Image (cartoon, rainbow, N blue to C red):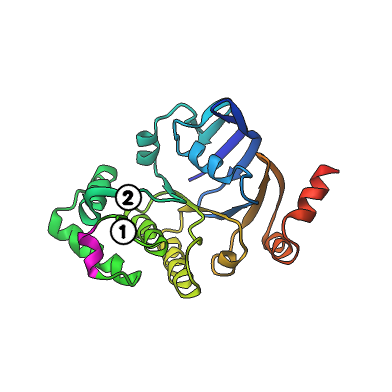
């Protein structure tokens, strides 16, 4: 799935959080959006997925040649957009199984009955090394940070979107959990080669497991640099400070 962002400006409660953003994402490729805290990374992700809190004041979002700037969140989800949240919400009363089966059946023409879906769910949970008891628990309620992130990847694995944005999926994960999650993401990418994947992160560590085709650096609501894996190594060695200084010259 190809997605293009043209001259995008976004406000939240009257404050400009994104400034003339121009980006291109090609079908089947992997991207990383990096930058320090408060640089606008999550704002960009939420804008792409039509969070109504983020008001577009200028520019367009083009998906496969079609302007979706004014398209609603549910329609964007049906078009194949997926966002794993940085801070997943707890949903009391909705079991993980029922939530995911409803989401799956809403997005797929071929509906799965409870028994067929349960078989699929158990397979995916086993791959993520998630205990079977998780499927009976309310979504994210009482989950640790790492457990919530595994649930986000479980959703990704089951829903198989065309364009996936993973917002700081590496935060709150220890080394072993990060490797399990990254292995699962890579498996999904290998099985669904046309899926476009975008990682939002502060750190280079996740990029040692998932190799992006292109990296964008976001700072103060603007794209200040773009490059390939060498750029991630530069950030690992020197932080964002030198890049920000170059941009301020």
Contact? badges 1 and 2 (CB < 8 Å): yes
Residue 133 is one of the magenta-drawn residues? yes
Determine the image quadrant of residue 247: top right
State the residue at coordinates (57%, 29%). Answer: 11
Q: Position of residue 17 (x, y in %)?
A: 61, 35
Marks 1 and 2, the one that precedes in the sequence: 2
Overall secondary structure of the magenta section: helix
For the record, the magenta segment spans: 132-137
Which residue in the protein does label 2 denote?
A: 90
State the residue at coordinates (26%, 68%). Answer: 123
Tell me: 38 left or right of 244.
left
**Marks 1/2: CA–CA distance:** 8 Å
Give the quadrant of the C terminus: top right
Nearer to the camera, 199 or 85: 85
State the residue at coordinates (50%, 62%). Answer: 170
Which residue in the protein does label 1 denote?
A: 142
Q: Residues within 10 Å of mark 1 (few under 14, many from 20)?
A: few
Q: Position of residue 206 (x, y in %)?
A: 56, 65
Q: Secondary structure at mark 1?
A: loop
Nearer to the camera, 113 or 50: 50
Determine the image quadrant of residue 231: bottom right
Nearer to the camera, 240 or 189: 240
Nearer to the camera, 124 or 195: 124
């Amino acid at each position: 799935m190809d997605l293009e962002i043209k001259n995008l400006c976004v406000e939240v409660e009257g404050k400009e959080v994104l400034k003339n953003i121009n980006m291109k994402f090609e079908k089947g490729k992997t991207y990383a959006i990096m930058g320090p805290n408060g640089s606008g990374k999550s704002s960009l992700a939420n804008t792409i997925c039509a969070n109504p809190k983020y008001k577009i004041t200028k520019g367009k979002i083009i998906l496969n040649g079609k302007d979706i700037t004014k398209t609603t969140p549910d329609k964007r989800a049906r078009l194949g957009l997926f966002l794993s949240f940085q801070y997943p919400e707890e949903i009391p009363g909705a079991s993980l199984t029922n939530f995911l089966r409803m989401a799956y059946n809403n997005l797929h023409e071929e509906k799965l009955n409870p028994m067929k879906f349960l078989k699929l769910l158990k397979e995916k949970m086993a791959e993520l090394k998630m205990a079977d008891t998780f499927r009976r628990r309310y979504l994210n309620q009482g989950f640790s940070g790492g457990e919530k992130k595994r649930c986000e990847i479980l959703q990704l694995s089951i829903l198989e979107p065309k364009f996936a944005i993973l917002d700081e999926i590496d935060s709150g994960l220890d080394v072993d959990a990060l490797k399990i999650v990254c292995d699962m993401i890579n498996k999904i990418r290998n099985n669904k080669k046309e899926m476009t994947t975008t990682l939002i992160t502060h750190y280079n560590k996740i990029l040692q497991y998932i190799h992006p085709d292109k990296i964008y650096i976001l700072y103060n609501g603007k794209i200040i640099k773009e490059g390939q894996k060498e750029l991630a190594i530069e950030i690992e060695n020197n932080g964002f400070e030198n890049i920000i200084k170059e941009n301020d010259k």
